[in-house]
Image (tube, helix red, strand yellow):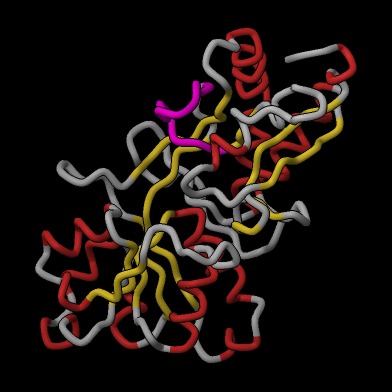
Amino acid sequence: MHANEAQAVLRVCADPDNLPLSNQRGEGYENKIAEELARDLGRRVEYTYFPQRMGFVRNTLRQRDEATKQFKCDVIIGVPKGYELTATTKPYMHSTYALVFAEKNELRELQTADDLLKLPRERLSKLRLGVFARSPGADWLLRNGLLEQAVMYAQQSGDPAENPAHTIEQDLTAGKIDVAIVWGPIAGYLVQRHSKSPQATSARWQAVPFLPDPTIKFNYEIAMGVRFGEKQWQGELDAWIDAHQGRIDEILSSYSVPLLDASGKVKQARRENGP
């Protein structure tokens, strides 16, 4: 880290409105992990917020405060393992993409994402499938001849108030799509939120994961991101993750994140109770 007076503060780079990951009210699982980390390091959390899209790292982890000349923040709680824009810690989360849908008609019988392909062709051809462009889900639809049924969403909206969870929740609730393909933590969060909403009385929502696939990568490991060259800080975070993986898993499970074991199988059951 930097000057002595900064040692009492854990400066975190985060998105202000991107649940279930983070928001300005501290309601995301990345917020909870940051709080645990700060407490164990004897620090308090301070955030630098910026929408997690193009320019995020440049405007947070790599940007200095004009007054103090210190970097604005020192850790991004969630980046892909091996992320090219930062150095990364050891991964603390391994999750996968999933389908999200209302449990009605034939959909209620789905146990894995590939079960969708086993539906009668007449039924399958009528489904509207929400998917984000340039995602594994889009590749899967293309491979299985379902891309014409896709409702395609841009990876990054021009509106900073929009995020993937809100977009999918809105269209699935309105019936604009029947099934969505989203990153697992978002899938679990949507099911959890819907279970507490007035609409839950009509049809439960369900999330089913994609199994390991030989040609399309659905599962990803998530680590913390730090600046290149800060080996001591990176090592401190690695040691903390090693010592607190169980607690991290508890936080993630409380948000219904589907967690995978080393073989790619879901290792913890989804929960519908909030954090």
Q: Is residue 185 left or right of residue 253?
A: left
Q: Can you say whether 27 is above or below 104 in the image?
A: above
Total marks placed: 0
Q: Residue furthest front?
A: 66
Coordinates of residue 179 in the picture (x, y in percent): 34, 75
Residue at image point 42% right, 30% down: 83
Q: Can you say whether 248 is above or below 199 in the image?
A: above
Q: Is residue 175 left or right of residue 111?
A: right
Q: Identify the image quadrant of the N terminus.
A: top right
Q: Is residue 75 left or right of residue 175?
A: right
Q: Can you say whether 102 is above or below 241 in the image?
A: below
Residue at image point 40% right, 26% down: 82
Coordinates of residue 149 in the picture (x, y in percent): 20, 78
Q: Quadrant of residue 106?
A: bottom left
Front residue of 209 and 129: 129
Q: Which residues are magenta?
A: 78-89
